[in-house]
Image (cartoon, grey):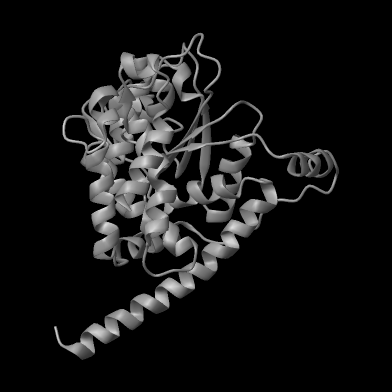
Amino acid sequence: MDNATLNTDLNDLVGQAEAAAAALAQARLEVGRAVFGQERVIEMALTGVLAGGHVLLVGAPGLAKTRLVAALARVLGLDWGRVQFTPDLMPADILGSEVLDVEDSGRRAFRFIRGPIFTSLLMADEINRASPRTQSALLQAMQEHEVTIAGQAHRLPAPFHVLATQNPIEHEGAYPLPEAQLDRFLLQVDVPYPDKETERRILIETTSMAMGEPAPVLDGPRLIAIQHLVRRMPVGEKVLAAILELVRSARPGGSPDPRVNAHVAWGPGPRAGQALMLAVRARALLRGRLTPSIDDVQALARPALVHRMALSFGGRAEGLDVEALVDDLAARAS
């Protein structure tokens, strides 16, 4: 490839990135009109979607997680649906099922009725309250973007994203998500309580008649184009080395941190590195940059790694905090 072609490709990439960054800045602003004081949560949720992945939102009830998903769907121009996960929820309640139709002629045939998963943005509310059998029904959909019913594969809409919620406080009647399913979430995002001034604003604006709705900014095809753009964004060697070092240092057995070797039962696999590679690009684009930086790696270390690690019994007994451990590993890798 000659220099002229390279320059043309680079100029095209820069132009697309600038246009996308402007649209995404407006999208963040519109979501912020509906969800107050959660700028980091909004950024992380958008980062996960732009990177083409799924996001697990962890927070107590009443922190506007449902409102966040609804606002994201409206701003991104996507259809969305919500499934309330309960212990008696069955896989067919999510995926759909086949029913037997009888025509006037007496001929019988099976017809597939699509479940709520056939949408672009699925909110899996309190996902850990469903049984493991029902939770596992999402595995194929989240990884392959299709479901198989009675041996027949059915493609899901494009784009397709799962934004699941989980209550970290109440564990009675809940089933911990298996490691294989946690690994399917690109990011895990903690949703904190608002500060005093934000809560004051919530009390005033959400209880009046003037509560507005965010305006649409993107649509499905435009979002897919931006997701493709994210994968084309260059990653510098320094950032690549930091991601590789961070992921490998979080695994027991060969980590330079003795706490990992002694107290981490299992660590992140290659999918964690893939998640970071995509997420740092998406965050950079959200912030109007063409290439990611070390700051992006540090900001995304917790969301990308914490749910892909588990402490041993000894680590928990000694009070080791996995989030603080990830922060230390990220600082060292940088």
Instruction: Provide residue 48's location: percent of width, then percent of height.
Output: 42, 48
Q: Is residue 59 visible?
A: yes
On screen, residue 13 above or below 197:
below
Residue nearest the observer in this picture, 175 or 123: 175
Residue nearest the observer in this picture, 115 or 267: 267
Instruction: Provide residue 245's location: percent of width, then percent of height.
Output: 24, 48
Q: Is residue 174 left or right of residue 249?
A: right
Tell me the quarter of the image containing the N terminus: bottom left
Residue nearest the observer in this picture, 292 or 148: 292
Question: Which of the 4 image quarters holds residue 224?
Answer: bottom left
Instruction: Provide residue 328's location: percent of width, then percent of height.
Output: 37, 41
Q: Is residue 218 left or right of residue 194?
A: left
Report the residue at 83% width, 49% height from top: 210
Report the residue at 84% width, 42% height from top: 204
Direction left: furthest residue: 1
On screen, residue 60 above or below 49:
above
Direction top: furthest residue: 172
Report the residue at 23% width, 32% height from top: 152
Report the residue at 40% width, 50% height from top: 298
Instruction: Provide residue 42's location: percent of width, then percent of height.
Output: 56, 48
Q: Is residue 15 left or right of residue 257?
A: right
Question: Which of the 4 image quarters holds residue 205?
Answer: top right
